[in-house]
Image (cartoon, rainbow, N blue to C red):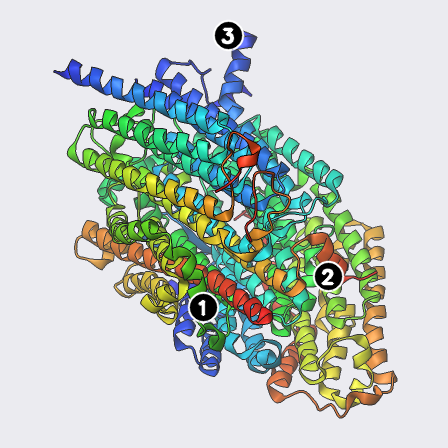
């Protein structure tokens, strides 16, 4: 079975989804989904171990050799991503039973788990595959389930957010499809590795330029890179809390992965960064994203929305690290992908707990919560500190590497701007702290109890991971470094 | 001769298409689509012979079936509430109820 | 013999093509819905029939012939029914035929 | 640059010329319809034109030798999606507002994207060129070896079901996702559904269409039979699980339109349809798992039987069944939910007025 | 060869793609410029269908026939784009169905399917 790990990674949640539909009873389905996600998590640990030991694993689906069939190609980069996705998914699922109790009507609970597993499958499929068209297919699986999951929110604005996301997402996916078509037309192959070998010969043709542009714009739409981020705040603020926690931590990360995969592996470093002004463009967009989104976050009254804007800002950091195009820069991006997944899932789960007890996540309802829900609020504070990048949290580690990479290149102004961006994070996190600890509770709220254990356990698992990986950085840094070295080394 | 017939079908398709675009009534459009569908069936049958591989007539059968289903579908839904808001449609329509 | 079949087939095809164009002209030029449906209803069925018969004379094997017969049968069945249903629905909805004088409007 | 063209200037031969002509004509029809769609405010007309657009693009696919694609596009573009859109506008209203959403900005975006695309086309291999890279790499393997490796004449089916079988698995999961998603969105309360007043009212409009009912009744068994033919003939001609599934669903939809939704639900109960959506995916997946357990890779049909060719045949047969099952049941499920929602709303309005 | 011939070759060699670009852009324009949710989805279908046309065009070979093996035929069109587009069509209908379902729900809860009005209702003032 060990040889089949790459495919098991994807088909375990995939097969579990229709089985859930047959099981029907919501709490059974919950246990089953948790089980499937847990198995996927274990698989990803084993895979990462295997990849670190023996190098890239190739798995030929259907037994057909690569350019003719589809292959799964697991290297350090995607093994790392697989680990992040399955880990977050499993932890978030622990809280799901309580989480959807009040936010989704009961007859839809089973369907929620089915869609959740499908979404997980889609993301895993995108990350694991080595075939460009297969990316599109699994992208659509994850997107379609995402639209539906967002629309499950109680607020009618959730429907509108889902619709907007559907339009933007489909445009993005179609752009990617056009780009893949052009690449295929010029090379005759869809296999990523084969593409990376055949593209350099024709890299000066106008068609390949256009293909690159369409793939990148398509991915950036999915990534919510500033200024293509307009769908994200609504989608994150009106989706059910569990869904937000899952997507905020994973969906954009998958898009970052695709960006890295296409620029570094498929089109190649020289094409992506030397022949095109991509670097400058991305640095500017990344920095603009950090500043505009952070500033907007400061003025938000809805805390979910606040953190949604903060997510866009954090994507800016990842893009800055990515566009440095050095080993340290990419390491910083990968670390931030991991770390941001940890903190955002913790924060959104904590908001879910607030939603569960208070029924709203408006800033004014946070007044006095510091005393009423001490554990949840403490989690939000630690998560917020991590978001700012205070030492001893994971946020510090990735910012540190990002600064290192910038200084390595001698880009002092950018480094200063990145630090300034973090100051903005202090402001918006402070607003929550102020509301929770320094304002008296609202008069008519009654007594609000601490969040239930089913929420607290996953939240605190994630928060402790936040602190643990902030202190002991050996594991994450070594994997991220190895992954980025391999991307700069021999290509795919 | 196959080619002549094909061209004739294309001309007929074009005329039906214009009727579909200009309307003016609801029923004119359904009629145009129906005719367009029939012409497509013939076109597919003919093109198979023109290109020398006539064994793919299954497609034409499907077209004929779907054509029927969509006309029935249109008529089915034309009875519903929202469809009745025909006020600014055109002059030849008069409403009984 | 072959030449006879070819000629007959050509005649059928041309006639069918002609009818189709006529129907097309009809649907475009006739003044109101009922005259248009008349034009297409009649010429469509007949034109399709002729073209399909013309094709049947050229078939390479039996399976193709069977399929052509199926298509022909379906055209003969479905087309009139669809046209009939359409006309009936139009009449019921209050779409009145265009008559000579405007005073004589009616169903 | 010329070396990149992979192409000798096209010599326009006579039989080429007619195909070229048909090609140009069909494409210009498409452009006409597309522009007409932009201008129109009546959504009903737009949907009719979109149906024509589907038919036309399907005809275009036939002239481009893509018979399988034409089959699918016809049943989807002109069939199912037209029906779904009609159901939708029967609930949401027929006319579009006249206001445009920032038209200048949109025009600029469209213009920039279009220029980029045109720029990209300039170095493309010429249309129809046999020396283009896609004709030289990967695809020749399918054309030359599929008969000996898989043993069925339809290369598209070979590639779809075996070489790229995992894509098709993904496709089935996409359609399954759509089914579940639509179901989750449009689910109707069970108690209210029991009420049949409105359905009877709906039926009465069709009582008079005696001829339609009669012909439909005769046609439905034939359509079902034809769907089975398409399902199992996919190895030799255009067709396969997806097309068969859509045709099957079309028959059921026809039934429910002519005889009323509740009658159709009595014949095919919704829980069974829901079960079948899952069953198709599971069937497909279990073929993969069985091949995994018998020592091959996932979806490696060679190991399903002692003789690899027989294994391929068996595998393709089973997965096509899975595809057909899921597609048919998802389409029916989606239609039931759309149409059930409509009945539900009409019932509510009915209650309000009385 | 002379320049005129060259241009003719380029025109006949690329006009398919140019028309596809026009179709794509018409669809794209409908999606971003129109406010009606159903119309947007129709635009999306046109956009996607034109991408399908693009893929199928590139697989065509002069003198080729449908990729279904038969005796005494040697030149076949490329089957791979057909396979890809079969999958893409399915994805397209799935997206359309979901989009329409969302539009129905939006109509039920907002009472309209016009973008401007919905946005006005969400952000009053």
Farthest left residue?
C1
Give above or below for C102 relative to A428.
above
Looking at the figure, which quarter contains the C terminus of chain B? bottom right
For image coordinates 58% across by 34% down, the residue present is D36
Q: Secondary structure at mark 1?
A: helix
Inspect this view and state whether residue E83 appears: no
User: In the drawing, does residue B41 fall left or right of residue D89?
Assistant: left
Residue bearing mark 1? A13
- Name the foreground residue: C62 vs A473: C62
Give above or below for E100 relative to B27.
below
Residue bearing mark 3? E1
> Mark 3 and mark 2: span between their CA atoms?
57 Å
Q: At which x and y percent is residue D13?
A: 38, 14
Q: At which x and y percent is residue C77?
A: 28, 41
Residue bearing mark 2? A314
10 Å crowding of disc 2: few (<14), some (14-19), many (20+): many
10 Å crowding of disc 1: few (<14), some (14-19), many (20+): many
């Amino acid at each position: 079975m060990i040889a089949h790990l790459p495919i098991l990674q994807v088909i375990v949640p995939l097969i579990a989804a229709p089985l859930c539909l047959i099981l029907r009873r919501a709490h059974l389905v919950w246990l089953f989904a948790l089980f499937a996600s847990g198995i996927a998590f274990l698989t990803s640990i084993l895979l990462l171990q295997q990849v670190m030991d023996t190098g890239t694993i190739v798995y030929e689906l259907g037994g057909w050799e690569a350019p003719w069939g589809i292959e799964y190609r697991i290297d350090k980069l995607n093994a790392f991503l697989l680990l992040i996705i399955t880990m977050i998914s499993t932890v978030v699922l622990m809280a799901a039973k309580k989480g959807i109790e009040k936010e989704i009507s009961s007859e839809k609970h089973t369907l929620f788990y089915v869609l959740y597993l499908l979404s997980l499958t889609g993301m895993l499929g995108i990350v694991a595959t080595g075939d460009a068209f297969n990316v599109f297919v699994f992208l659509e699986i994850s997107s379609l389930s995402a639209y539906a999951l967002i629309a499950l929110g109680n607020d009618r604005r959730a429907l509108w957010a889902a619709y907007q996301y559907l339009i933007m997402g489909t445009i993005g996916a179609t752009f990617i499809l056009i780009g893949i078509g052009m690449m295929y037309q010029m090379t005759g192959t869809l296999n990523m590795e084969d593409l990376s070998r055949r593209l350099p010969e024709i890299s000066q043709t106008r068609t390949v330029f256009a293909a690159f542009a369409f793939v990148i714009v398509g991915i950036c739409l999915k990534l919510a890179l500033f200024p293509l981020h307009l769908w994200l705040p609504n989608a994150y603020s009106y989706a059910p809390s569990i869904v937000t926690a899952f997507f905020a931590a994973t969906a954009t990360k998958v898009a970052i992965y695709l960006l890295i995969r296409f620029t570094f592996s498929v089109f190649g470093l020289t094409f992506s960064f030397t022949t095109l002004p991509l670097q400058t463009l991305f640095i500017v967009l990344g920095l603009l994203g950090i500043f505009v989104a952070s500033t907007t976050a400061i003025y938000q009254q809805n805390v979910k929305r606040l953190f949604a804007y903060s997510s866009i800002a954090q994507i800016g950091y990842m893009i800055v690290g990515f566009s440095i195009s050095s080993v340290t820069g990419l390491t910083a991006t990968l670390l931030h992908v991991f770390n941001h997944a940890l903190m955002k899932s913790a924060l959104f789960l904590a908001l879910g707990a607030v939603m569960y007890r208070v029924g709203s996540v408006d800033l004014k309802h946070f007044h006095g919560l510091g005393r009423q829900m001490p554990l949840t609020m403490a989690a939000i504070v630690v998560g917020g500190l991590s978001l700012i990048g205070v030492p001893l949290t994971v946020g510090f580690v990735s910012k540190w590497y990002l600064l290192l990479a910038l200084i390595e290149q001698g880009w002092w102004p950018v480094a200063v701007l990145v630090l300034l961006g973090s100051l903005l994070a202090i402001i918006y996190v402070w607003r929550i702290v102020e509301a929770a600890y320094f304002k008296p509770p609202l008069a008519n709220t009654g007594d609000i109890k601490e969040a239930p254990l089913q929420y607290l356990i996953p939240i605190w698992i994630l928060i402790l991971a936040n602190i643990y990986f902030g202190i002991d950085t050996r594991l994450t840094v070594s994997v991220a470094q190895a992954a980025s070295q391999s991307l700069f080394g021999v290509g795919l | 001769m196959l080619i002549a017939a094909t061209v004739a079908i294309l001309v007929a398709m074009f005329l039906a298409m214009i009727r579909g675009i200009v309307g003016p009534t609801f029923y004119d459009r359904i009629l145009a689509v129906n005719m367009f569908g029939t012409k497509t069936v013939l076109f597919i049958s003919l093109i198979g012979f023109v290109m020398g591989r006539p064994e793919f007539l299954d497609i034409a059968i499907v077209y004929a079936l779907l054509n029927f289903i969509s006309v029935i579908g249109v008529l089915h839904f034309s009875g519903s509430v929202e469809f009745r808001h025909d006020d600014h449609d055109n002059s030849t329509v008069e409403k009984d109820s | 013999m072959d030449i006879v079949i070819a000629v007959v087939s050509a005649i059928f095809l041309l006639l069918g093509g002609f009818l189709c164009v006529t129907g097309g002209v009809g649907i475009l030029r006739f003044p109101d819905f009922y005259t248009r449906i008349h034009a297409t209803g009649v010429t469509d069925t007949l034109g399709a029939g002729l073209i399909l018969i013309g094709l049947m004379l050229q078939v390479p094997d039996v399976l193709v012939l069977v399929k052509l017969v199926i298509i022909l049968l379906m055209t003969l069945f479905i087309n009139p029914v669809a046209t009939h249903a359409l006309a009936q629905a139009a009449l019921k909805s209050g779409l009145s035929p265009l008559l000579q004088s405007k005073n004589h409007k009616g169903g | 640059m010329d070396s990149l063209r992979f192409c000798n200037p096209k010599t326009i031969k006579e039989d080429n010329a007619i195909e070229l002509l048909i090609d140009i004509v069909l494409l210009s029809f498409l452009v006409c319809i597309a522009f007409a769609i932009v201008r129109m405010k009546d959504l009903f007309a737009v949907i009719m034109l979109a149906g024509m657009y589907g038919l036309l693009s399907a005809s275009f696919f036939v002239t481009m030798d893509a018979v399988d694609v034409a089959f699918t596009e016809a049943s989807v573009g002109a069939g199912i999606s037209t029906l779904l859109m009609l159901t939708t506008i029967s609930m949401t209203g027929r006319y579009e507002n006249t206001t445009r959403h920032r038209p200048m900005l949109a025009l600029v975006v469209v213009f920039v994207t279009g220029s980029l695309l045109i720029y990209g086309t300039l170095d493309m291999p010429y249309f129809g060129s046999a020396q283009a890279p896609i004709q030289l790499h990967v695809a020749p393997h399918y054309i030359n070896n599929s008969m000996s490796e898989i043993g069925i004449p339809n290369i598209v089916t070979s590639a779809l079901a075996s070489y790229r079988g995992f894509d098709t698995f993904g496709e089935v999961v996409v359609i399954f996702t759509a089914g579940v998603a639509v179901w989750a969105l449009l689910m109707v309360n069970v108690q209210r559904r029991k009420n049949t007043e409105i359905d009877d009212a709906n039926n009465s409009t069709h009582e008079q269409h005696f001829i339609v009912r009669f012909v439909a009744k005769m046609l439905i068994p034939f359509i079902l039979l034809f769907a089975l033919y398409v399902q199992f003939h996919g190895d030799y001609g255009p067709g396969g699980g997806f097309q068969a599934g859509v045709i099957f669903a079309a028959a059921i939809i026809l039934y429910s339109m002519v005889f009323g939704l509740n009658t159709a639900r009595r014949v095919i109960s919704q829980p069974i349809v829901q079960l079948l959506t899952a069953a198709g995916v599971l069937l497909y997946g279990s073929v993969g798992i069985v091949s995994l357990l018998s020592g091959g890779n996932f979806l490696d049909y060679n190991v399903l039987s002692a003789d690899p060719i027989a294994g391929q045949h068996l595998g393709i047969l089973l997965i096509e069944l899975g595809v057909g099952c899921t597609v048919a049941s998802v389409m029916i499920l989606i239609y039931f939910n759309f149409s059930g929602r409509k009945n539900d709303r009409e019932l509510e309005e009915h209650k309000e007025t009385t | 060869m002379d320049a005129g011939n060259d241009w003719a070759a380029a025109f006949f060699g690329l006009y398919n793609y140019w028309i596809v670009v026009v179709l794509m852009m018409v669809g794209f324009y409908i999606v971003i410029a129109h406010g009606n949710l159903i119309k947007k989805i129709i635009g999306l279908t046109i956009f996607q269908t034109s991408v399908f046309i693009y893929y199928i065009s590139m697989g065509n070979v002069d003198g080729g026939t449908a990729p279904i093996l038969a005796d005494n035929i040697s030149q076949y069109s490329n089957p791979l784009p057909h396979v890809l587009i079969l999958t893409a069509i399915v994805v397209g209908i799935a997206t359309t169905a979901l989009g329409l379902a969302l539009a129905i729900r939006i109509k039920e809860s907002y009472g309209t399917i016009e973008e401007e009005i919905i946005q006005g209702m969400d952000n009053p003032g």
